Image (cartoon, rainbow, N blue to C red):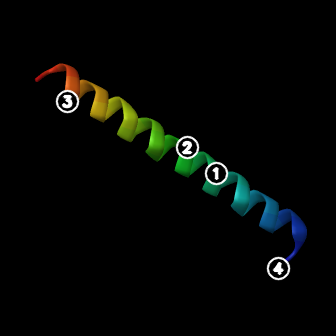
Amino acid sequence: MNRRLLGQVLFWATITTASVLLGAVVYGALVYFNV
């Protein structure tokens, strides 16, 4: 695996993880405040 491809994979993995975490936080906040 060349370095450029590895960097791109790490970049997208980071973006995806951040999106999932952000979505979970927003969803949790909505559920919490709607109680």
Q: Amino acid at mark 3?
A: Val
Give the CA distance from mark 3 to mark 1.
26 Å
The residue wearing badge 3 is 31
Give the CA distance from mark 1 to mark 4.
18 Å
Give the CA distance from mark 2 to mark 3.
20 Å
x and y percent of residue 29 in the render?
Answer: 30, 27
Give SS at disc 3. Answer: helix
- For the point 14% across and 21% down, the residue is 34
Give the CA distance from mark 3 to mark 4.
43 Å
Image height check: is 34 above or below 22?
above
2 or 3: tag closer to the N-terminus: 2
x and y percent of residue 30 in the render?
Answer: 25, 25
Q: Based on the displayed image, in which of its 4 quarters is residue 24 positioned?
A: top left
- For the point 87% across and 63% down, the residue is 4
18 or 35: nearer the viewer: 35
Q: Amino acid at mark 1?
A: Thr
Give SS at disc 4. Answer: loop
Q: Would you say 13 lies left or right of 3 here? A: left
Q: Would you say 29 lies left or right of 17 here? A: left
Give the CA distance from mark 2 to mark 4.
24 Å
Give SS at disc 2. Answer: helix
The residue wearing badge 1 is 14
The residue wearing badge 2 is 18
- For the point 20% across and 20% down, the residue is 33
- Evaluate if marks 1 and 4 touch, with contact meaning CB atoms under 8 Å apart: no
Q: Would you say 14 lies left or right of 27 here? A: right
Q: Amino acid at mark 2?
A: Ala
Q: Residue furthest right?
A: 3
The residue wearing badge 4 is 1
